[in-house]
């Protein structure tokens, strides 16, 4: 009986290790989302640009403003990065909803700190929802919806 119990324990340990060794699509999306926020904090426009789908259908929604197209959004980030731009998440992995093997959505509550390089900064909370598509072997953002958090 002890050898059967040991066998099942060994199988469970090996299976758990195999699950940790191979990340699934949701883990890949979460890791890429985290890399996107880290690149924003580093003002690494090249990485930010590469994580966003290079499409005229790319959409950034910031409050009432709609910005269409990868290049227009990259241009906007380049301007914002000239000043203070910091994104702080709650430290938890992004919530990922897989639609299928090639499409997903992430949700991340964040606090943005923005402002001119010299001068007063503003801090505000947003809920950021991103739609992701698999492009080749990479996950890329197709749209970003940043919704201000307001008390009810």
Image: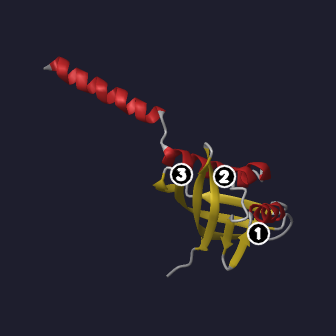
Q: Nearer the viewer, mark 2 or mark 3?
A: 3
Residue at mark 3 to residue at mark 1: CA–CA distance? 38 Å
Q: Say which mark, if any, is on residue 36.
A: 2
- The mark nearer the N terminus, 2 or 3, is 2
Kindly state the secondary structure of the residue where label 2 is placed: helix
Kindly state the secondary structure of the residue where label 3 is placed: loop
Up the image or down, 44 lies above or below 72; here it is: above
Residue named by callout 3: 102
Q: Residues within 10 Å of mark 3 (few under 14, many from 20)?
A: some
Inspect this view and state whether residue 4 appears: yes
Q: Are marks 3 and 1 in contact (CB under 8 Å)?
A: no
Up the image or down, 118 lies above or below 96; here it is: below
- Residue at 53%, 79% (x, y): give it: 151
Q: Nearer the viewer, mark 1 or mark 2?
A: 2
Kindly state the secondary structure of the residue where label 1 is placed: loop
- Residue at 76%, 64% (x, y): give it: 73
- Residue at 47%, 32% (x, y): give it: 21
Q: Say which mark, if any, is on residue 121.
A: 1
Inspect this view and state whether residue 41 appears: no
Q: Position of residue 52 (x, y in %)?
A: 69, 55
Q: Position of residue 145 (x, y in %)?
A: 61, 69
């Amino acid at each position: 009986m002890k050898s059967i119990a040991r066998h099942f324990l060994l199988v469970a340990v090996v299976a758990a290790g195999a699950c940790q060794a191979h990340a699934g699509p949701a883990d890949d999306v979460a890791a890429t989302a985290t890399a996107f926020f880290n690149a924003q904090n580093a003002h690494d426009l090249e990485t930010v640009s590469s994580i966003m789908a290079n499409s005229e259908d790319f959409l950034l929604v910031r409050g009432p403003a709609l910005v269409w197209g990868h290049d227009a959004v990259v241009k906007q980030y380049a301007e914002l990065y000239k000043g203070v731009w910091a994104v702080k998440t709650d430290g938890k992995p992004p919530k990922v909803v897989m639609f299928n093997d090639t499409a997903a959505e992430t949700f991340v509550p964040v606090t943005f700190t923005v402002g001119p390089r010299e001068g007063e900064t503003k801090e505000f909370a947003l809920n950021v929802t991103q739609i992701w598509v698999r492009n080749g072997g990479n996950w890329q953002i197709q749209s970003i919806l940043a919704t201000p958090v307001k008390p009810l």
